[in-house]
């Protein structure tokens, strides 16, 4: 009765869903110091330490031939300390830039007046190499630049291009800031490749199974909208995605495809038995209970991750559960409405001619016969696999290091 209204509602809701998902993708961030709840004593001590001694938001910058007497190093440091060429950023991205020669000069002058050898010994291992010649620059990122880390790193590379005899390809940059940015970039690039591959595989498999472009299109569009909605929730509810919660859309997409296939299967059975008229309504009547139970139990399983102390894990559980329930609502709104408004008539005629839904294919019957004839063997293999699985689970090691991601 409300098929047209359902489709109109989805068409109106699609732009804000797509916009929210797009904005969420722009705000992904990986800062390991933000992964612990603020109520933890460890977190409070970390912030106390950062307020007094600064954070570890820094970059170590060097290049081949970077020595204490290299004139390119102080020039590079001077360019890095200046505001970037970006008109949208009118403040320095780095609050201080240390170099080996500068630190030696400060330590050998008043008030310290250390001997040069003593100054070199104290700086050895972080600003001075063991050969007492190799050195580097350490750039401390300004607090105002925490939201502009990619711009800060790009500014470092652009600064190298302004120094005679240096280029951006010559630099070697390290530090947890560039680690986080590199993970963000790698995640974005690989996610696009994997998403396209996943979409192509899913569409191909659904078409082979459904033998209908229209049915494949209905399930695919519903799954994609569900996937985008699960991401949009993060933007509209103020969450910042990270490398863990970025997996939420993929999980919701797979679950939406699965539920959509179940609904289409019920629809096909009704068409085969009674024809196209009323098949969509009957399919929904049969499918809503098992699909809803599956979605709610999945959401409970995802929601159980809220007990985790790691914020990215609990965030993943929250939005995976919310996305799963949202996908269920879209499933029983979009697909039945589309089946009513644009029924696959040619496909339905072919299915109805069979006069019955597809039963177990011969190879499934053969497999059932094997299970019945050899129950002990099947049970023994199952127990063996269970033992192997338990042994493997005992060797799992949990980590929260960015490099391990």
Image (cartoon, rainbow, N blue to C red):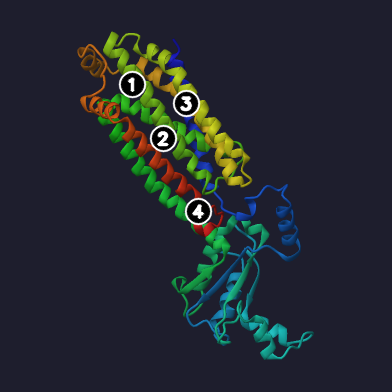
Look at the picture and state if 202 lies above or below 336. Answer: below
- Tell me: 114 left or right of 199: right
Question: What is the distance, in whole Å, between disc 1 and disc 2 at their CAs?
Answer: 17 Å
Q: Residue at x 45, y 20 (%)?
A: 290
Which circle's residue, 4 or 2, is located before the other in the chain?
4
Which circle's residue, 4 or 3, is located before the other in the chain?
4
Q: Secondary structure at mark 1?
A: helix
Q: Nearer the viewer, residue 73 or 405?
A: 405
Residue 196 image offset from top left, x and y in percent: 36, 43
Residue 265 circle label: 1
Pair 2/3: label in front: 3
Residue 359 circle label: none
Q: Please say if the residues under marks 4 and 2 sit with CB atoms less than 8 Å apart.
A: no
Residue 69 image offset from top left, x and y in percent: 57, 87
Locate the N terminus by quadrant: top left
Residue 254 circle label: 2
View extreme (right): residue: 111
Question: What is the distance, in whole Å, between disc 1 and disc 3 at their CAs?
Answer: 16 Å
Residue 233 image offset from top left, x and y in percent: 55, 35
Q: Secondary structure at mark 2?
A: helix
Residue 229 image offset from top left, x and y in percent: 50, 33
Q: Please say if the residues under marks 4 and 3 sit with CB atoms less than 8 Å apart.
A: no
Which circle's residue, 1 or 4, is located before the other in the chain?
4
Q: Residue at x 61, y 43 (%)?
A: 308
């Amino acid at each position: 009765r409300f098929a047209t209204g359902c489709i109109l509602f989805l068409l109106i809701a699609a732009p804000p869903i797509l916009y929210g998902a797009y904005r969420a993708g722009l705000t992904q961030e990986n800062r390991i110091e933000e992964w612990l709840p603020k109520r933890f004593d460890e977190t409070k001590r970390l912030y106390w330490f950062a307020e007094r001694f600064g954070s570890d938001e820094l970059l170590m910058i060097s290049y081949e031939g970077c020595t204490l007497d290299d004139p390119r190093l102080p020039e590079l440091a001077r360019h890095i300390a200046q505001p970037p060429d970006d008109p949208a950023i009118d403040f320095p991205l780095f609050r201080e830039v240390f170099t080996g020669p500068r630190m030696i000069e400060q330590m050998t002058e008043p008030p310290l007046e250390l001997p040069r050898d003593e100054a070199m010994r104290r700086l050895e291992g972080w600003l001075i190499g063991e050969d007492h010649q190799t050195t580097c620059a350490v750039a401390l990122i300004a607090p105002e630049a925490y939201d502009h880390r990619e711009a800060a790193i790009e500014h470092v590379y652009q600064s190298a291009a302004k120094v005679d005899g240096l280029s951006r390809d010559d630099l070697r940059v390290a530090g947890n800031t560039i680690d986080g940015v590199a993970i963000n970039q790698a995640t974005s690039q690989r996610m696009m490749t994997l998403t396209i591959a996943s979409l192509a595989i899913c569409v191909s498999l659904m078409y082979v199974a459904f033998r209908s472009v229209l049915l494949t299109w209905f399930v695919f569009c519903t799954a994609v909208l569900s996937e985008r909605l699960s991401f949009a929730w993060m933007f509209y509810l103020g969450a910042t995605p990270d490398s863990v919660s970025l997996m939420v859309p993929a999980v919701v997409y797979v679950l939406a495809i699965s539920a959509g296939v179940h609904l289409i299967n019920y629809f096909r059975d009704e068409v085969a038995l009674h024809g196209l008229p009323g098949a969509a309504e009957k399919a929904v009547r049969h499918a809503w209970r098992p699909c809803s139970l599956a979605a709610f139990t999945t959401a409970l399983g995802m929601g159980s991750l809220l007990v985790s102390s790691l914020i990215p894990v609990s965030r993943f559980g929250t939005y995976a559960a919310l996305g799963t329930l949202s996908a269920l609502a879209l499933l029983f709104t979009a697909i039945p409405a589309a089946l009513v408004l644009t029924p696959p008539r040619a496909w339905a005629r072919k299915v109805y001619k069979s006069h019955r839904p597809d039963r177990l294919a011969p190879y499934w019957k053969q497999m059932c016969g094997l299970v019945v004839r050899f129950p002990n063997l099947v049970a023994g293999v199952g127990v063996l696999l269970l033992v192997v699985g338990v042994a493997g689970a005992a060797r799992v090691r949990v980590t929260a290091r960015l490099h391990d991601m």
